[in-house]
Amino acid sequence: MTPGAALLLADLTGVAIFAASGASAAVAKRLDLFGVVFVGFVAALGGGIFRDLVIDEAPPLAFADWRYAVTAAVTAVAVFWLHPQLARLRTTVLVLDAAGLGLFTVTGTLTALRAGLPPVGACVIGMLTGIGGGLGRDLLTGEIPVVLRREIYAVAALAGAVAVVGLDRAGLAGPGPLTLAALFVFVVRLVALRRRWSAPVAAERSARDPLPDRSGPDEA
Amino acid sequence: MTPGAALLLADLTGVAIFAASGASAAVAKRLDLFGVVFVGFVAALGGGIFRDLVIDEAPPLAFADWRYAVTAAVTAVAVFWLHPQLARLRTTVLVLDAAGLGLFTVTGTLTALRAGLPPVGACVIGMLTGIGGGLGRDLLTGEIPVVLRREIYAVAALAGAVAVVGLDRAGLAGPGPLTLAALFVFVVRLVALRRRWSAPVAAERSARDPLPDRSGPDEA
Amino acid sequence: MTPGAALLLADLTGVAIFAASGASAAVAKRLDLFGVVFVGFVAALGGGIFRDLVIDEAPPLAFADWRYAVTAAVTAVAVFWLHPQLARLRTTVLVLDAAGLGLFTVTGTLTALRAGLPPVGACVIGMLTGIGGGLGRDLLTGEIPVVLRREIYAVAALAGAVAVVGLDRAGLAGPGPLTLAALFVFVVRLVALRRRWSAPVAAERSARDPLPDRSGPDEA
């Protein structure tokens, strides 16, 4: 397999995985078939569309290559019909989501570097490619975005993006090391989930509800 | 009238219609004059701005041609002053919204094809141009986006976009057939509203609230 | 100091100020360290990224120049550790936010004019650069966006953008007049806050809750 084909395969695998996560969230919200497909589409392709807009790759791959949209749509429809089984496989979904995070972070960082972005920019873009789809999914379904919750999620992606930039600088950005970087994000995310690792929260100031709905800080 | 002038007229008509829908939603939320204008602006121009970013038309028409911003702003201000009358004309607003959906889907798909996008990408862009403004309007005003509700909305736009691509491929993308495509979207949306057609929803799994506010699927 | 260096300094000052506002809002929502940094990043850089996408400046400055991302991140981390003191300095935060609004409106309008946008487009872009970060911050933290509330905020930015376009047309866009334009936005916003100025709201139609949560106008 050529490097280009490997990157495409990794990308489409990530698309299917995130489409499944978005579609599952939409089914849980009782959205209709189109809503499920739409949220799946945003979750699968939102991060990559943002990345391509930023690096001025026009039109974005998600629109230029029909395999992206079709992969996302077919996966979402499949989840719509199969969701009772998936519900019983919740752990599997979380594992797949972590795998997608790893894949997209690595392909996103690489794409940004190839487009000539400097290291800090490429790290941020790579991280956003990884977490962007979940962000869109959560905004659409009225959730507090997963990246803002008290879990290790984006930090794992950022660490992976930094690793990819480091490998690229060292001339080691071959398939093996890059696969290891994706695996690293995957494992860190899974271990964090299992051990309930979380980032620090600022010291308590009052006894109020942790995430008051629609009330501003100024009104407390 | 030249084809270019006809496309501009269709576009500006769609802008006015969607600005009215956004402004009406903002008035209903008790936003102030500026908020009403802002939501009207996003509803009228959001879909087209996204389309132009994706096809690398820079700057987007909404910023390059002052008639777009002015049409949206004037319409929103008019709704702000006239809203008690509009409230009694709710059916009219729904009819206009369906007309805007048809217009924007057709102009968006055509613009994407002219910019060289492949068929699947042009269909998705055309649909997003049609539904994008309403999506922005609903995110801003804290609604579950209309495209995610149990109604035929985006599906009508998608069908219209597919029709436009088909007409274009067949060399029939003249004013007459394109107007028919816009009318098709318009009529499907109206009939769906009147007959309460809706897309299928996944089979029931529990008796819980259909759209629980701010609670994740994992917490149920 | 060269004009370019002055513009960069003004921009980075605005970045730090808006990062502090975003981080403070995130701390108040009890987000973790990464969430605080992420919201700070979006608040500080969101408006400028949107501006650069629209004027086809690729990649956006926020990704091309590492000083932007680092300034935002360092400020957000500082707020995370220092927030109890900041909470007692709430007035200071509001003053800084108004200063950032003035700075970003002026630099955003200038950047759009330099990129060749026509006057109306440059005004809208300048205003959106000023208010965009706060909009992203509020969408992420589940707030009704500040620009949609009953306060003079975006109107002040729009007036400042119009002033910058006027100065540019008159050949007077030097450091002195531009600083005055930023000061003008700053002072209008502060006076509006102090005197509780607000834009008009549409006439009352019923006694219902001003901003009903997640309920559409059609359901009332």
Image (cartoon, coloured by chain):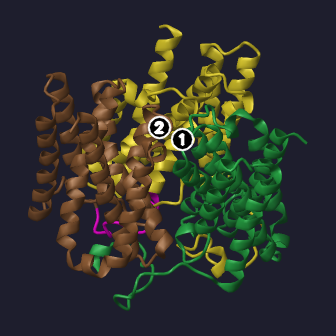
Chain colours: A green, B yellow, C brown
- The amino acid beneath tag 2 is Leu
Residue denoted by label 1 = A54
Element under disc 1: helix
Which range of residues does the magenta coloring cover?
Answer: C206-220
Quadrant in which the C terminus of chain B is drawn:
bottom right
Label drawn at residue C113: none
Give me the chain letter of mark 2.
C
Dividing the picture into quadrants, the one containing residue C117 is top left
Residue B105 vs residue C95, the one in the foreground: C95
In the picture, residue A56 is in which quadrant? top right
**Residue for point 60% across, 27% down:** B106
Residue at 21% x, 30% y is: C165
Residues marked 2 and 1, same chain: no
* Residue at x 42% of width, y 55% of height: B140
Secondary structure predominantly adopted by residues drawn in magenta: loop
Element type where label 2 sits in the image: helix
To which residue does mark 2 refer?
C53
Q: Is residue C217 magenta?
A: yes
Classify residue A186 as left or right of residue B115: right
Residue C27 on image: x %, y %: 39, 75
Q: Amino acid at mark 1?
A: Val
Residue C40 image position (x, y, % from top left): 40, 62
